[in-house]
Amino acid sequence: MEVSMSTLKYADCIAACNECADICDYCATSCLKEDNVAMMARCIRTDMDCAALCRLAAGALARESEHAVAICQLCAQVCEACAEECEKHDHDHCQRCATACRRCAEACQKMAA
Amino acid sequence: MEVSMSTLKYADCIAACNECADICDYCATSCLKEDNVAMMARCIRTDMDCAALCRLAAGALARESEHAVAICQLCAQVCEACAEECEKHDHDHCQRCATACRRCAEACQKMAA
Amino acid sequence: MEVSMSTLKYADCIAACNECADICDYCATSCLKEDNVAMMARCIRTDMDCAALCRLAAGALARESEHAVAICQLCAQVCEACAEECEKHDHDHCQRCATACRRCAEACQKMAA
Amino acid sequence: MEVSMSTLKYADCIAACNECADICDYCATSCLKEDNVAMMARCIRTDMDCAALCRLAAGALARESEHAVAICQLCAQVCEACAEECEKHDHDHCQRCATACRRCAEACQKMAA
């Protein structure tokens, strides 16, 4: 039988959470390779929080959890904070991460509305 | 800046892991709504293992972890076990889950090769 | 050098979160072995949510995350919901889980205060 | 009803995994505050892998997963690698992390034997 993510109830929000988690994880690793790592410390820390919360949110949404709305509200908040931090840095991985975080925050807010 | 998952080194394997995790989480929830839940107990338990390992693998791949190969090898093994269990059940969610697990196992084996 | 969890800033809350996660995971597995699994479906689902959130909270606390307070607030809320569901069932694992959930909710509320 | 972690089948191994995860998460955060962060990059990355795997192992053990042995084998391997990296650094948090990683590796090997 063909698998289709679109059969999941909150497919769009799940996709945004997965993407954001992956891009945050990649941003953290990439920040650790930058010349001035010390300047990236806060970005790395918020990337870790954001990735963890996005993966938890994706799972809760896929399980159609009773707590999905509350989890998405918190996820949106952490995504916004991560986007704000990433936007301060010119590195491609940070700019891309900011975009993924804004998109995920929006998807989570829409889901929670 | 545009986000593109395809910029990630192991994009295909990451996508397969995310999809498999989501479908496993959905399968677990759906199994719990079936008439004969007792018959689905092993499926639910292996879904939980598989979802957890696929999410961990996606993160390790996105971080380009030194342990990504070893993690993908274990992930492939658990995905195969989950597919075998899911294939025993006729429910749509189980059949779809088996397909996602096989696909993820293949992607993980290819990555680890 | 000797390891001591007590060197961690939020050691008590971290310990409560770890314990609650483990007891919830054990409760989910035990519920799946009960004669009337269908009656335990909601308990299993809330166990999964609670375990996932408690593990995420333990990590955020150990990393002294900026978002630890917000995460603990949500964790307390999900622990309360899990305790309420578990208290409905006479099984030892459910009653123990309810106790661990109440204890963790209290630790998280105290941390977030 | 009184909660007791000692009622769990693999209580010792679960406790070692939880402790190791927490100490790794704390080590990662502490490394990011060191003067020479660049020198700590590999330590931070292995801390992330180790924390994630230890939390997954604790959950699998608590659920008495069929895959607990295979997961503990991989967990032991990643803990050893993390201990080796941490031992290179004189910081207290790294030395403590190395001890926790060795202890967890031993507990996981014993469980998997």
Image (cartoon, coloured by chain):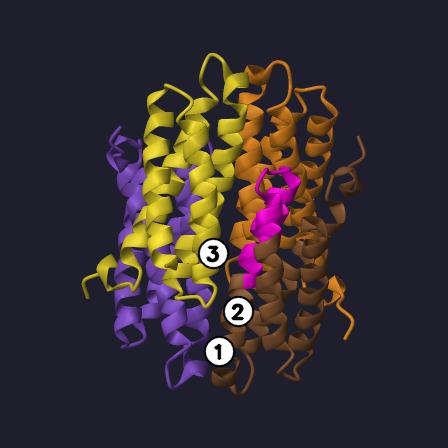
Chain colours: A brown, B orange, C yellow, D purple
Residue depth check, mark 2 versus mark 1: number of the one nearer the observer: 2
Q: Chain of mark 1?
A: A
Q: Position of residue A109 (x, y in %)?
A: 68, 56
Instruction: Say which residue label 1 marks.
Output: A41
Residue B8 visible (yes or no)? no
- How many numbered callouts? 3
Residue A77 position in % (x across, y down): 59, 62
Q: Looking at the picture, how far across and down is residue B51, in whole percent?
A: 58, 41
Which residue is painted at 65% across and 41% down in the image? A62
Task: Work out whether residue B64 or residue C39 is closer to the camera in this orientation and state it.
Answer: C39
Mark 3: which amino acid? Ile
Provide the residue span drawn in magenta. Answer: A50-72
- Relative depth, front residue between A67 and C9: A67
Callout 3 touching callout 2 (CB < 8 Å): no
For the residues carrying marks 1 and 3, which lies nearer the camera in this image? Answer: 3
What's the distance in space between the residues labelled 2 and 1, CA to CA? 9 Å
Report crowding for label 2: few under 14, some 14 to 19, many 20 or more residues within 10 A (C-alpha): many
Query: Pointer 2: what residue?
Result: A46
Residue holding disc 3? C71
What is the chain identity of the residue bearing mark 2? A
